C-alpha cells in the first residue's frame, strides 16, 4: 500500500517544498482579514502534510510543517528572516530569575530541609549544585514528571532562593518591570495577531468533538475520504487485554500490537487502522465487542483523516508556541494576554478557560502538551500566574467534577496544577480572601461524598465500585487543602480572618459528618458474619490528620481567630452530643462519702465509635488556649462556663474503654476490622489526632472536675464500679472460681484503668498541657524508643510522627540523647541511648505498644543489673503542668484513688487466687511512686511560707476507715516487701519506702511535722533497712554466682555447636592436617620441591579417609572402591572475559578445543566441599526429584533450584549444586611406569611424539578409508615405520571401579552440558575438552582473585576451594579413561600441531589466538593417551616437562609479539644482565622472522621486565595446576606473600631462572618453531596493524566505576530513554555493573525473545554480557539486582549509604546517598568468586516470596 502511494506523495512533497515562507508571510502582512487568510492556508496545506497513510512519519511531517506552516508564521512575527529575528529578540530579552525547568520522569529533584518553605519546593540538579543548599540538609527524590524547578521563586525559599546561574542581575531588579518595553511596537502588534489566531486555532481543533466534520473555516471543497480507527487509552484495561484485542481486531502481529499499545499508553491515542469508513468501523466494532464484557469498552473513534491531521498540527503548534516564547519574556507575556483574554461569550470563555474545561475530554498527549505550555508561559509570568490562579479557582468546582468522571490518573489532569498556585503563600492567601478558596475546596469535597447515614454522618458501608473509585479521587482535594494551609500567614487582615473562619466552619461541617461514624456494637454469642468496612473512614482520618493539625497551627497564630474557632468548635460539639443524657435515667454513684450523678451507659452493650474528630479538635484548641495564656488574660472572652466537663470526657472515655475491653478480650467476636481500628488509633500515623487528643480531652475535662467524681464515672464506664464500691467484693470474688474468664477480664480492665490514670497524670509533654516545649516532647519520644533497643535512623523516623513538611524534628535533639555508632560492612548505623537519659525512662510511656513496653522493661532492668543497681524502675520526675491543667495532680491524692489502691494492695496482701494480678500491683506501685515524686517536687519548689497542699504521704500513713478498718497503705507495703511471691517488685517497694522517708525528712526540716505518730515506724524502718541491706548483699552474691554458672553453660553450649560443625567438616580437617604433617616433615627439604618432570619430588602416598555427610560412614578414597563425590556447581562464566560481544553462536557446531586468549566464555566449577557416597547422593537426588514433581503438580510453585536441570541443594549447607565431582587419588601415579631408558631431550621428544601422531593419523585414515580391505591397511601400517616401542593397538586397562567410572562420566557430561548449553551426550568428542577447559578456567579465575587481593599463591586457601581445585584437577586428569582413546589422541594431535606444525592440520589458530594455559592443561591431560601406548620408556613426567617448556616458550614469544614495545624515551643503557642479553637476542631472532614489521629495538631491561610480568600469571596458574595434579607440596615461601616469588616459582616448576635459557638450550628446534609461528599470516596482519591481539599480562576485570554521589546516577538515568520506543523515558532504567550498559528494564517495549520466551531487557542482557548471570543496579530503586538464568534472581543491598549509615532501597527517605567502597568491593568479590548464583540461592531459600517473582521480565 505504501509503495502505491509513493510517487503521488513525492509529487506533493515537491510542490510543498516549492512554497516560500517569505512570500506567504508577505501576503499575510498585506491581508485585510488575516484570520481568514491564515485559516485558508492551513485548510489547504495541513491535510497535505499530516496523515497521509496508516503510519505517521514524524520527521518528514515536522520538516514539511516547519517549511510550509510554521516558517511563514515566524517570518510574519519577526518581520524578517527568523534566523536573524529570533536571536535579536533573544538578545534584547532580560530573562527573569525563575528557572522553571520542567521535570522529566525520573529526573532527580532536590529540596532543602532547612530552607524550603514546604516540601513541594524543589530544585533541578543544575540549580541545586549552584545553590547554597547543597551544604544544607537536603532531600533528594525522583520526579514523577510534571512540575518545575522553583529556583528564583523568592516565596519558595526561606533563604538562598537563587542559584548562581539565576542570580545574574538581582542588583538592578525592577521586579515588576513590564517585559514588553524591550519589544518594538510592530513586533508586539504582529505577535499579538499571529498568537491570537494560532492559539485559537489550536484550542478550537483540539477541543473539536465531531468525528466526521471540520470547523466550517477549515472545510475544503474537494477532499478524499479516508479515515482512521483511533484507539484511546484508559486506566481500566490492562496492557495484555489491549494487545490481545488488537491482534484480533486489526489482524496484526503481536509485535505490532505491543507497539500500538505502548503508543496508546504513552500518547493517549493511536490510530490502529487506516482506510475507508467501513473498513475502520469494522475494526472499531470488534474492539468494542471484545472489551465490553466485564467493564466499559475501550474508547474507539472512527475519525476523518483531515481532523486528525489538524489535531496533529494543533499539537505541533502548541509546542511551537512554547519554543517561540522562550526567545523573549515579552513574547511570553503576549501569549499570556492572548490566552486569558475573555472571549465573546464572557466569563470563562478565554482560551485558557476553554482548554481547562475540556481537559477531561482530551487525550493524554494533548493534555500534557498544553499543560507544559501553561507551565512555560502562565506560570513563569508572575503577573499572569496570579490571573491564571484566579481562573483556576473560579473553575475549581467544575474541574474537580470533571476529574471525578475522568478515568485518567491525576498526573495528567489539569487539577494537578493546583500545587503550583496553592503552595505559593501570597497566591494562596489571595485566593482564600478573594475567591474563598478554603470554603470552596471543602464544600466541593463534601459534595462528592453524599452517602450519609440517618444522623448525617459519612457512610462507607456498602459502597459501590464507582463510589469507591470516586472516594479515591476525591482524596486529592484534601491534598489541595493541605497545600493551601501549608504556609502559615505572618500577618492577619480582617478579611483573612473572616474567610479563614468561614473555611473553618466548613471544615467543622466536614468533621461533624465524621464524628461518630462507623459505630460498632459488641457482638455476643456468634461471631460477626462479615467484617464491616472500616478502611475508608480511617483513610479519611489519616489523610485529614495533617490538615487538622494545620488548622490548629493557623488558629494558634492569632488570638482572635483562636477564640472564635474555639467557640465554633464547642458549638458544633454540643450539636453533636448536646442531648447525650436524653432518654436515660440518671444514676447516682457513691464511694468514700463522695457522690456523683451520671448516665447509665455501657460500652459493652451500646453503640460506640472510634471517630471523634470534633472532640479532638476542641482538645487541640484548648491546649492552644492554655499555651497562649489568653485564657488567663481574658477569661471573659471564653465560653468556659458553657463547658460541661462530663460531656467533654464522655466520648473520649468511651473510646478508651473500648480499647481496654478489646484488650480484655471482650470484643473477640467482632473480628479483625475492630482489631485493625484499635491498631491505627494508636499508630504513629494517626495517634496525634486520635489517641493523644483523647487523653488531652480527658485531662481537660478532669482538670475542671472533682477528681473523685471523675474516678467514679470512670469506674462506672469501665464497668468496675461494683467491684470497688462493695467493700467485701474481693473476697466474694475469689470464691467465684466458676467464672475464671470473668475474673481474668476484670483483672485486665482494672490494669487498663490504672494505666489510664497513670497517663492522665503523667502525660504532660505536649506544650500547653505541661510546661514544656516541642523539643522536650520529641526528646522524650526518642528516649523511649531507644530504651527498647538501639535503633537506626530510619527506624526512629518511622516511630515518630511527621509534620506536614515530613519532618520529625529529630535531628535537632538526637545528639543530646543518643550516641551514633557507625555501621560495619553489613548492617546499619545505630543510635544508642546515652546512659544519663535512662532516668527519664517511664515504663508506662503512653506510646508504647504492649510488646514494646515489655521489651523496654526487660532492657532497662538488664541495664540496671549490669550497672549493679537495683532493678526498680521508678517513675521519672515530671515537668509541672500548665495552670489550666494543674489540678490534675489531685487525682493522685483523691479519696477514691486511695481507696482503689488500698483495695488492690489488700488483695495482694491476702494473696488469694485470681482476684489480683502482678501487673495490677505494679501499676499501683507506679502510681504511689508518681505521687511521692509529685509531693517531693512540691516540697522542693514551694516558697518559704507556702503551704503545700499535696499531702499524699500523710494520707497513705492513715489506716482505712470503718467498716473494714484495713491497715494503712504504708503498712501494707511493708508487709508486701517480705512476701516471697513478689520478688520482682521488692526493689520498687524498697524505693517507695525510701522516698517516703526522704519526703518525711524534708517535711520535718521545713516545718513542724504534722505526722508524729509514725515516728516509731521510721525507727523500725532504719533497723529493718540494715538487715535488708545484708539480705540484699547475700542475694547479690547469689545472683553473681548464678550468672557465672549461666555464662559457663552457654559457653559450653557454643563449644558443642562448634564441635558438631567440625564433625561435618571432618574431611577437610583431615586433609589439612595430613598435608600439614607433610609440610613439617624434615625428609623433604625446601629446595628439592619440584612439581613436575622426571625430577619431581616423590611423595609417599597419603591415605585419605572421608565421611559421607548423608550416612555418616567413613571410607577411604581408593581406586577400586565405590566413589565418593563432592557437591559441585558448574556454570558458564564471562568474569575473565576481555570481549563481551562474543558468545557461542551455534553450540552444536562450536569447537572448544582452543580457548581464545580473550577468555570470552569459560566454564567455572565451584563446590561447597561436602562429601557424599556416590550412591548416597544418587538416592538423595532421586528423592529430591520425586518430591519436586509431586510438589509441582500440587502447588505449581517454583523452587530456588531447577531440578529438571539437575540442580539440587547440598544436603548439608543448602548450597546450590548441579552435579558432583568424584574424589580421586593423584591419577598420574597409577599410570607411571618405570623409566628404564634415558629420557629424550626436547628435540628428540618432539620428533618422537610427532612420529607417533603421524602413525596414529595414518592408522585412522586407513581405518576410515575402507573396512573391507583390511589386509591392505595392515600392510600400509606396516609400511609406516612405527616408532620404536609404540604399540597403537594396545588398550590400557581402566583401573577404576565401575562406580568411579560412572561418576567420571556424570561430571564430564554435566560440564559439557552446562558449558556448551547443549543436551547431554556422553559420547560427544567435546566432553573431554570441556573438562580440561573447566579445570584451566577455574584455576585461572582463582589465580586472579589471589593476585587482585595480593594474597600468596599457596597461602591458606579456604578448605572448600582447595578441595574443589584438587578434585577438579584430578578428575580432569582421569577423565580420559572413560573416553575413546582415539578421540583424545586426535585432540592431542591437533593441540600439538598448533605449536609443532604438521601437514595434516591446517586451519589451526595462530599463537596469538590461543590461551597458553588452556593449551598447557589440555596437552598435559591428553598426553597419557599417547604415552600409554608407548613402551619405549619415555615417562609421563618427561612428557609433562617438555610440554610445559614448549608451551612456556610459545607464551614468551606470544608476549614479545604483543607487548607494546614503544620506547618511553628512557636512556638505552647497555644491557648488563644475563637475562637482558638473552631476551634481546631472542627478540632479534623474532625480529628477523617477522621481517621489519616488529617495531624497533627496545632495551633489554624493558623486554625482560615485560616478559617477566607477562608470564607471571601463567606460571602461577601452572604451579597451582601441577601442585594439584601431582600432589607435591609447595615450598613454604609461597605461603607468605613476598616480592621475589619468581625464582621460587621457576624452581618449583623445574624452569631455569633465566627463562630465555630454554630457547638457547633447544635452539636447533626452537628457531624453526619460532619461524613457523612468526611466519603465520595472522601474525603478519597483526604486526601490520590490521587486527588486534590480547597483550599480557591481562588486566583483571572490575565492575564499572560508580559515582560518589548517587544523584548523578539518577541524573544519568533520567537522560536515558528507551532505545525502542522513540525517545520515551524508560521507567525502570537499570545499569549493568559489569559493562556499564543502561537498560530499559521491566517494560514491554524492550522485551525480546530468548529461546522462545519473552524476556525483559536485563535477562536478555545477561545472556550476552554475563553468559546467564548478571549484576545490575536498578537506579530508581537504588537496589542491586542479581540475576541468573531466566528464573532466578534476588535483590541485594546497594553500595550507597546515607549519613546515618543506612541504605535506601526504593529511595523512600531521600537522604543524600554516597558510595560505600567497601560494600561495592564486596559485590565485586561475589562476582569474581562466581558466587552470584549461590547468593541468589541462599536469598531465595531464606525468603520464599523471592521465588515467585517473574525475574525474566526484569
Ligand atoms: Zn533549575
Ligand atoms: Zn537556578
Ligand atoms: Zn537550604
Ligand atoms: Zn553415604
Ligand atoms: Zn555443602
Ligand atoms: Zn524500553
Ligand atoms: Zn553488561
Image: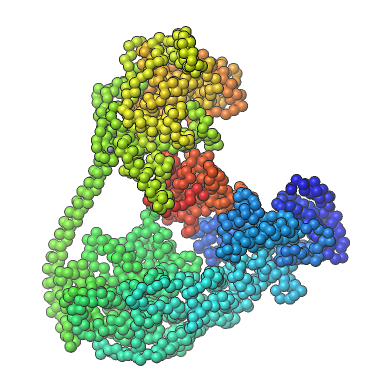
- Where residue 875 sits in the image (x, y, percent)? 28, 71
| Picture layout, residue 1647 above or below residue 401 | above
Residue under the point 56% across and 64% down? 294
Along the viewing direction, whichever of 36 and 1350 lies nearer the viewer:
36
> Which residue of the protein is positioned furthest toward the front in this rendering?
1268
- Where residue 820 sits in the image (x, y, percent)? 38, 57
Q: Which colour scheme is used?
A: rainbow
Along the viewing direction, whichever of 892 and 176 lies nearer the viewer:
892
Residue under the point 15% across and 62% down? 1035
Residue under the point 34% across and 23% down? 1294
Which quadrant of the figure has residue 1207? top left
| Picture layout, residue 1122 above or below residue 265 | above
Along the viewing direction, whichever of 714 and 182 lies nearer the viewer:
714
Describe residue 258's horizontal placement relative to residue 1101 as left or right.
Answer: right
- Where residue 1455 sits in the image (x, y, percent)? 50, 24
Q: Can residue 442 be seen in this view?
A: no
Residue under the point 54% across and 35% down? 1145
Describe residue 704's horizontal placement relative to residue 973 as left or right.
Answer: right
- Where residue 849 sits in the image (x, y, percent)? 34, 68
| Picture layout, residue 523 above or below residue 814 | below
| Picture layout, residue 1041 above or below residue 605 | above
Q: Number of callouts in the render?
A: 0
Q: Is residue 1626 visible?
A: yes
Describe residue 1018's horizontal placement relative to residue 196 as left or right.
Answer: left
Amino acid at each position: 500500500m505504501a509503495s502505491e502511494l509513493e510517487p503521488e506523495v513525492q509529487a506533493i512533497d515537491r510542490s510543498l517544498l516549492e512554497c516560500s515562507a517569505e512570500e506567504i508571510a508577505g501576503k499575510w502582512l498585506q491581508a485585510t482579514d488575516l484570520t481568514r487568510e491564515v485559516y485558508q492556508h492551513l485548510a489547504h496545506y495541513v491535510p497535505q502534510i499530516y496523515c497521509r497513510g496508516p503510519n505517521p512519519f514524524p520527521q518528514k511531517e515536522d520538516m514539511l510543517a516547519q517549511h510550509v506552516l510554521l516558517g511563514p508564521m515566524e517570518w510574519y512575527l519577526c518581520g524578517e528572516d527568523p534566523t536573524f529575528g529570533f536571536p535579536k529578540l533573544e538578545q534584547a530579552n532580560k530573562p527573569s530569575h525563575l528557572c522553571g525547568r520542567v521535570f522529566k520522569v525520573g529526573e532527580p529533584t532536590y529540596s532543602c530541609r532547612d530552607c524550603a518553605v514546604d516540601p513541594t519546593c524543589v530544585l533541578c540538579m543544575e540549580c541545586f549544585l549552584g545553590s547554597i543548599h547543597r551544604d544544607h540538609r537536603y532531600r533528594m527524590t525522583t520526579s514523577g514528571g510534571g512540575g518545575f524547578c522553583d529556583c528564583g521563586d523568592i516565596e519558595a525559599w526561606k533563604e538562598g532562593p537563587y542559584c548562581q546561574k539565576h542570580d545574574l542581575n538581582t542588583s538592578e531588579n525592577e521586579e515588576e518591570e513590564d517585559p514588553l518595553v524591550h519589544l518594538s511596537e510592530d513586533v508586539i502588534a504582529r505577535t499579538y495577531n499571529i498568537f491570537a489566531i494560532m492559539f485559537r486555532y489550536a484550542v478550537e481543533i483540539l477541543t473539536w468533538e465531531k468525528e466526521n466534520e471540520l470547523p466550517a473555516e477549515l472545510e475544503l471543497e474537494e477532499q478524499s475520504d479516508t479515515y482512521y480507527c483511533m484507539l484511546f487509552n484508559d486506566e481500566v484495561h490492562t496492557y495484555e487485554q489491549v494487545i490481545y484485542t488488537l491482534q484480533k481486531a486489526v489482524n496484526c502481529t503481536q509485535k505490532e500490537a505491543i507497539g500500538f499499545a505502548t503508543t496508546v499508553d504513552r500518547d493517549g491515542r493511536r490510530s490502529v487502522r487506516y482506510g475507508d469508513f467501513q473498513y475502520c468501523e469494522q475494526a472499531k466494532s470488534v474492539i468494542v465487542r471484545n472489551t465490553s464484557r466485564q467493564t466499559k469498552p475501550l474508547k474507539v473513534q472512527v475519525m476523518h483523516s483531515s481532523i486528525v491531521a489538524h489535531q496533529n498540527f494543533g499539537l505541533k503548534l502548541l509546542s511551537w508556541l512554547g519554543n517561540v516564547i522562550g526567545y523573549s519574556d515579552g513574547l511570553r507575556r503576549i501569549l499570556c494576554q492572548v490566552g486569558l483574554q475573555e472571549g465573546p461569550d464572557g466569563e470563562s470563555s478565554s482560551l485558557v478557560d476553554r482548554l481547562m474545561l475540556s481537559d477531561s475530554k482530551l487525550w493524554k498527549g494533548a493534555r500534557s502538551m498544553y499543560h507544559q505550555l501553561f507551565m512555560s508561559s502562565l506560570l513563569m509570568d508572575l503577573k499572569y500566574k496570579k490571573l491564571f490562579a484566579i481562573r483556576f479557582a473560579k473553575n475549581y468546582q467544575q474541574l474537580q467534577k470533571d476529574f471525578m468522571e475522568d478515568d485518567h490518573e491525576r498526573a495528567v489532569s489539569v487539577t494537578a496544577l493546583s500545587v503550583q498556585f496553592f503552595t505559593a503563600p501570597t497566591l494562596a492567601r489571595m485566593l482564600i480572601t478573594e475567591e474563598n478558596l478554603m470554603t470552596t475546596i471543602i464544600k466541593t469535597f463534601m459534595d462528592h461524598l453524599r452517602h450519609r447515614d440517618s444522623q448525617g454522618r459519612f457512610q462507607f458501608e456498602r459502597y459501590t465500585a464507582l463510589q469507591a473509585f470516586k472516594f479515591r479521587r476525591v482524596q486529592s482535594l484534601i491534598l489541595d487543602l493541605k497545600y493551601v494551609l501549608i504556609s502559615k500567614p505572618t500577618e492577619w487582615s480582617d478579611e483573612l480572618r473572616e474567610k479563614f473562619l468561614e473555611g473553618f466552619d466548613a471544615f467543622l461541617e466536614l468533621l461533624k459528618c465524621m464524628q461518630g461514624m462507623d459505630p460498632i456494637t459488641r457482638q455476643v454469642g456468634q461471631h460477626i458474619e462479615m467484617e464491616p468496612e472500616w478502611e475508608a473512614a480511617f483513610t479519611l482520618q489519616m489523610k485529614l490528620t495533617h490538615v487538622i493539625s494545620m488548622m490548629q497551627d493557623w488558629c494558634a497564630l492569632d488570638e482572635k481567630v483562636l477564640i472564635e474557632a474555639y467557640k465554633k468548635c464547642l458549638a458544633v460539639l454540643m450539636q453533636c452530643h448536646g442531648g447525650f443524657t436524653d432518654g436515660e435515667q440518671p444514676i447516682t454513684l457513691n464511694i468514700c462519702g463522695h457522690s456523683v450523678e451520671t448516665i447509665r451507659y455501657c460500652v459493652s452493650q451500646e453503640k460506640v465509635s472510634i471517630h471523634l474528630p470534633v472532640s479532638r479538635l476542641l482538645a487541640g484548641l484548648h491546649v492552644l488556649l492554655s499555651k497562649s495564656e489568653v485564657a488567663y488574660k481574658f477569661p471573659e472572652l471564653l465560653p468556659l462556663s458553657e463547658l460541661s466537663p462530663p460531656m467533654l470526657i464522655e466520648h473520649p472515655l468511651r473510646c478508651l474503654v473500648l480499647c481496654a475491653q478489646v484488650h480484655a478480650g471482650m470484643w473477640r467476636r467482632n473480628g479483625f476490622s475492630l482489631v485493625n481500628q484499635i491498631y491505627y488509633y494508636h499508630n504513629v500515623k494517626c495517634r496525634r489526632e486520635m489517641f493523644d487528643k483523647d487523653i488531652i480531652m480527658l485531662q481537660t475535662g478532669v482538670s475542671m472536675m472533682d477528681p473523685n467524681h471523675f474516678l467514679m464515672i470512670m469506674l462506672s464506664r469501665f464497668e468496675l464500679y461494683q467491684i470497688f464500691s462493695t467493700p467485701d467484693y474481693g473476697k466474694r470474688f475469689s470464691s467465684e472460681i466458676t467464672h475464671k474468664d470473668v475474673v481474668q477480664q476484670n483483672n485486665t480492665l482494672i490494669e487498663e484503668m490504672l494505666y489510664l490514670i497513670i497517663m492522665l497524670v503523667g502525660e504532660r509533654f505536649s506544650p500547653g498541657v505541661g510546661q514544656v516545649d516541642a523539643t522536650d516532647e520529641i526528646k522524650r519520644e526518642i528516649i523511649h524508643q531507644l530504651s527498647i533497643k538501639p535503633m537506626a535512623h530510619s527506624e526512629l523516623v518511622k516511630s515518630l510522627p511527621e509534620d506536614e513538611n515530613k519532618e520529625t524534628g529529630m535531628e535537632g535533639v538526637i545528639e543530646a540523647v543518643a550516641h551514633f555508632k557507625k555501621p560495619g560492612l553489613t548492617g546499619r548505623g545505630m543510635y544508642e541511648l546515652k546512659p544519663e537519659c535512662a532516668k527519664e525512662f517511664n515504663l508506662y510511656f503512653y506510646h508504647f505498644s504492649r510488646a514494646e513496653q515489655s521489651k523496654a522493661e526487660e532492657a532497662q532492668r538488664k541495664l540496671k543489673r549490669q550497672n549493679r543497681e537495683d532493678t526498680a524502675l521508678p517513675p521519672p520526675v515530671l515537668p509541672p503542668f500548665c495552670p489550666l491543667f494543674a489540678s490534675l495532680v489531685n487525682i493522685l491524692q483523691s479519696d477514691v484513688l486511695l481507696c482503689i489502691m488500698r483495695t488492690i494492695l489488700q488483695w495482694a496482701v491476702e494473696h488469694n487466687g485470681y482476684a489480683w494480678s502482678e501487673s495490677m500491683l505494679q501499676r499501683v506501685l507506679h502510681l504511689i511512686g508518681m505521687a511521692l515524686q509529685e509531693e517531693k517536687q512540691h516540697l522542693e519548689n514551694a516558697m518559704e511560707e507556702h503551704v503545700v497542699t499535696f499531702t499524699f504521704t500523710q494520707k497513705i500513713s492513715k489506716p482505712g476507715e470503718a467498716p473494714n478498718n484495713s491497715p494503712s497503705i504504708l503498712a501494707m507495703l511493708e508487709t508486701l516487701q517480705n512476701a516471697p511471691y513478689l520478688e520482682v517488685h521488692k526493689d520498687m517497694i524498697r524505693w517507695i519506702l525510701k522516698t517516703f522517708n526522704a519526703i518525711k525528712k524534708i517535711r520535718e526540716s521545713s516545718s513542724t511535722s504534722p505526722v508524729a505518730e509514725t515516728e516509731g515506724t521510721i525507727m523500725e524502718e532504719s533497723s529493718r533497712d540494715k538487715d535488708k541491706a545484708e539480705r540484699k548483699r547475700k542475694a547479690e552474691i547469689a545472683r553473681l554466682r548464678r550468672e557465672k554458672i549461666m555464662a559457663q553453660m552457654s559457653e559450653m553450649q557454643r563449644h558443642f555447636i562448634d564441635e558438631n560443625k567440625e564433625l561435618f567438616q571432618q574431611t577437610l580437617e583431615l586433609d589439612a592436617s595430613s598435608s600439614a604433617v607433610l609440610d613439617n616433615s624434615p625428609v623433604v627439604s625446601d629446595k628439592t620441591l619440584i612439581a613436575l618432570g622426571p625430577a619431581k619430588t616423590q611423595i609417599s602416598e597419603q591415605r585419605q579417609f572421608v565421611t559421607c555427610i548423608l550416612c555418616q560412614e567413613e571410607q577411604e578414597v581408593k581406586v577400586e572402591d565405590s566413589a565418593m563425590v563432592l557437591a559441585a556447581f558448574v556454570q558458564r562464566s564471562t568474569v575473565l572475559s576481555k570481549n563481551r560481544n562474543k558468545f557461542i553462536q551455534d553450540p552444536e557446531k562450536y569447537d572448544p578445543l582452543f580457548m581464545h586468549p580473550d577468555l570470552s566464555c569459560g566454564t567455572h566449577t565451584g563446590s561447597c566441599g561436602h562429601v557424599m557416597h556416590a550412591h548416597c547422593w544418587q538416592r538423595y537426588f532421586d528423592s529430591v526429584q520425586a518430591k519436586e514433581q509431586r510438589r509441582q503438580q500440587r502447588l505449581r510453585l517454583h523452587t530456588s533450584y531447577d531440578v529438571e536441570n539437575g540442580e539440587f541443594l547440598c544436603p548439608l549447607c543448602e548450597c546450590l549444586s548441579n552435579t558432583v565431582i568424584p574424589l580421586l587419588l593423584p591419577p598420574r601415579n597409577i599410570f607411571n611406569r618405570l623409566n628404564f631408558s634415558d629420557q629424550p631431550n626436547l628435540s628428540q621428544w618432539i620428533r618422537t611424539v610427532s612420529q607417533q601422531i603421524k602413525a596414529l593419523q595414518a592408522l585412522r585414515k586407513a581405518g576410515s578409508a575402507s573396512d573391507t580391505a583390511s589386509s591392505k591397511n595392515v600392510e600400509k601400517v606396516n609400511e609406516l615405520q612405527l616408532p620404536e616401542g609404540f604399540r597403537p593397538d594396545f588398550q590400557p586397562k581402566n583401573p577404576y571401579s565401575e562406580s568411579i567410572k560412572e561418576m567420571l562420566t556424570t561430571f564430564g557430561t554435566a560440564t559439557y552440558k552446562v558449558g556448551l548449553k547443549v543436551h547431554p551426550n556422553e559420547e560427544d568428542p567435546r566432553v573431554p575438552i570441556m573438562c580440561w577447559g573447566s579445570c584451566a578456567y577455574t584455576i585461572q579465575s582463582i589465580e586472579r582473585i589471589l593476585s587482585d587481593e595480593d594474597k600468596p599463591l599457596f597461602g591458606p586457601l579456604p578448605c572448600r576451594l582447595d578441595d574443589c581445585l584438587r578434585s577438579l584437577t584430578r578428575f580432569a586428569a582421569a577423565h580420559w579413561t572413560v573416553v575413546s582413546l582415539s578421540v583424545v589422541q586426535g585432540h592431542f594431535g591437533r593441540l600439538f600441531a598448533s605449536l609443532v606444525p604438521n601437514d595434516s592440520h591446517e586451519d589451526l589458530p595462530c599463537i596469538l589466538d590461543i590461551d597458553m594455559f588452556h593449551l598447557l592443561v589440555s596437552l598435559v591431560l591428553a598426553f597419557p593417551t599417547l604415552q600409554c601406548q608407548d613402551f619405549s620408556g619415555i615417562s609421563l613426567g618427561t612428557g609433562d616437562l617438555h610440554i610445559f617448556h614448549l608451551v612456556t616458550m610459545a607464551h614468551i614469544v606470544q608476549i614479545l609479539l604483543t607487548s607494546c614495545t614503544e620506547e618511553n624515551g628512557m636512556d638505552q643503557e647497555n644491557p648488563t644482565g644475563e637475562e637482558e642479553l638473552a631476551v634481546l637476542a631472542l627478540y632479534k631472532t623474532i625480529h628477523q622472522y617477522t621481517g621489519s614489521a616488529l617495531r624497533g629495538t627496545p632495551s633489554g631491561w624493558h623486554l625482560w621486565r615485560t616478559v617477566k610480568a607477562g608470564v607471571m600469571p601463567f606460571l602461577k596458574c601452572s604451579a597451582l595446576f601441577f601442585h594439584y595434579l601431582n600432589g607435591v607440596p609447595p615450598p613454604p615461601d609461597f605461603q607468605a606473600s613476598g616480592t621475589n616469588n619468581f625464582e621460587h616459582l621457576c624452581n618449583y616448576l623445574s624452569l631455569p631462572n633465566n627463562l630465555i635459557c630454554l630457547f638457547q638450550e633447544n635452539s636447533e628446534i626452537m628457531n624453526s618453531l619460532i619461524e613457523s609461528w612468526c611466519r603465520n599470516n595472522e601474525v603478519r596482519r597483526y604486526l601490520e596493524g590490521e587486527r588486534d591481539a590480547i597483550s599480557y599480562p591481562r588486566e583483571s576485570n572490575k565492575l564499572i566505576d560508580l559515582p560518589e554521589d548517587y544523584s548523578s546516577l539518577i541524573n544519568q538515568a533520567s537522560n536515558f530513554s528507551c532505545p525502542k520506543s522513540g525517545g520515551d523515558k524508560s521507567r525502570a532504567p537499570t545499569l549493568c555493573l559489569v559493562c556499564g550498559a543502561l537498560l530499559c528494564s521491566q517494560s514491554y517495549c524492550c522485551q525480546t525473545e530468548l529461546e522462545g520466551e519473552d524476556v525483559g531487557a536485563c535477562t536478555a542482557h545477561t545472556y550476552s554480557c554475563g553468559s546467564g548471570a548478571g549484576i545490575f543496579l536498578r537506579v530508581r530503586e537504588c537496589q542491586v539486582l542479581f540475576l541468573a538464568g531466566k528464573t532466578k534472581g534476588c535483590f541485594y543491598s546497594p553500595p550507597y549509604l546515607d549519613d546515618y549509615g543506612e541504605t535506601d532501597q526504593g529511595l523512600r527517605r531521600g537522604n543524600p546517598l554516597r558510595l560505600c567502597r567497601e560494600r561495592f568491593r564486596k559485590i565485586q568479590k561475589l562476582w569474581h568468586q562466581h558466587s552470584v548464583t549461590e547468593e541468589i540461592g541462599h536469598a531465595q531459600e531464606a525468603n520464599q516470596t523471592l521465588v515467585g517473582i517473574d525475574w525474566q521480565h526484569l
